[in-house]
Image (tube, rainbow, N blue to C red):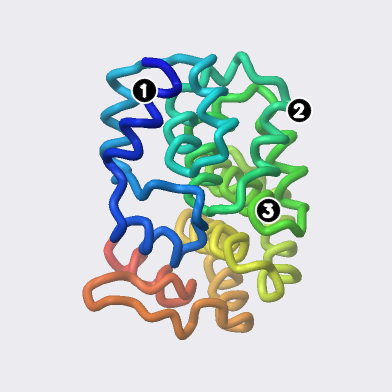
Amino acid sequence: MTLDQVMAQLEAWGSEKARELYKRHGAGDRQFGVNRGDLRALAKRIKTNHDLALELWETENIDARLLATLLLRPKNLSRSDIEAMIASCDFYQLTDWLVVNVVKAAPFKNELCAEWSASGEEYTGRAGWSLQVEHVKKGNASSEELASLLDTIESRMKAAPYRMQETMNLCLGEIGIRHADLRERCIQIGDTLGVFKDYPTPKGCTSPYVPEWIAAVVGKT
């Protein structure tokens, strides 16, 4: 498919209801409002197409950029390419898709993780802490690294921009769930900071407030 064909298909799939929903979550006006399942299905049809993906990214349309993350060939991107992509993200879902589908496959992801998680910029910081979460989940973090992460979360999370705060909080919870020796400290940090304590959690769902989240997950094991 050509760029024009893909953009025409995305526009045809667009929904006013979806546009309004995504706008409420920060997507802005450069979007058609395409169902994310349709994007994934289209990516399967097209398969990896790096050149087309770069063209889609250049449109600055959110739907096109999300699709691009599924078509890119990560090994063809330099560190500066990926840094520029992350720097241009201003929607949390696009940041997340770029991290999951592209950045995680980069050989220099550890360096980016350290650099981005130190950033005060909302979406770059979100990307960095998303990579920190993956590092914790894989069990690759040393005791010294975990202690340093907790120190940083304790000192920075309360004042962090919201979308970065989300992934910092996720990292705190994952450490507490996976490391019994650090669990009490994670709960204490969550309790002291109070981040997401009043988050409106639907019935039957787990609160993102770390003390409640850890208790809910650990209580099931």
Dot 2 or dot 3, earlier in sequence: 2
From the viewer's side, name the closer residue of 103 and 1. 1
Q: Identity of the amino acid at label 2? A: Ser
Dot 1 or dot 2, earlier in sequence: 1
Image quadrant in which you'd find residue 113:
top right
Question: Measuring 74% from the left and 62% from the top, which residue is drawn there?
Answer: 152
* Residue at the disc numbered 1: 5
Dot 1 or dot 3, earlier in sequence: 1
* Residue at the disc numbered 2: 80
* Residue at the disc numbered 3: 125
Question: Measuring 47% from the left and 54% from the top, which residue is drawn there?
Answer: 178
16 vs 166, left or right, is left
Image quadrant in which you'd find residue 36:
top left
Mark toward the viewer: 1 or 2:
1
Instruction: Classify 113 as above or below 160.
Output: above
Give the Cα distance between marks 1 and 2. Answer: 29 Å
Mark number displayed over residue 83 = none
Question: Measuring 33% from the left and 45% from the top, which residue is drawn there?
Answer: 34
Q: Identity of the amino acid at label 3? A: Gly
Give the Cα distance between marks 2 and 3. Answer: 17 Å
Q: Where is residue 27 in the image (x, y as percent from the top left)?
A: 49, 56
Q: Please tell me whether mark 3 sits on a helix, a strand or a loop.
A: helix
21 vs 73, left or right, is left
Question: Measuring 68% from the left and 49% from the top, which residue is drawn there?
Answer: 124
Instruction: Classify 61 as above or below 27.
Output: above
Instruction: Classify 62 as above or below 45.
Output: below
Q: Where is residue 153 in the image (x, y as percent from the top left)?
A: 68, 65
* Label 1 environment density (alpha carbons within 10 Å; few <14, some 14–19, many ≥20): few
Q: Identity of the amino acid at label 1? A: Gln
State how many labels appear: 3
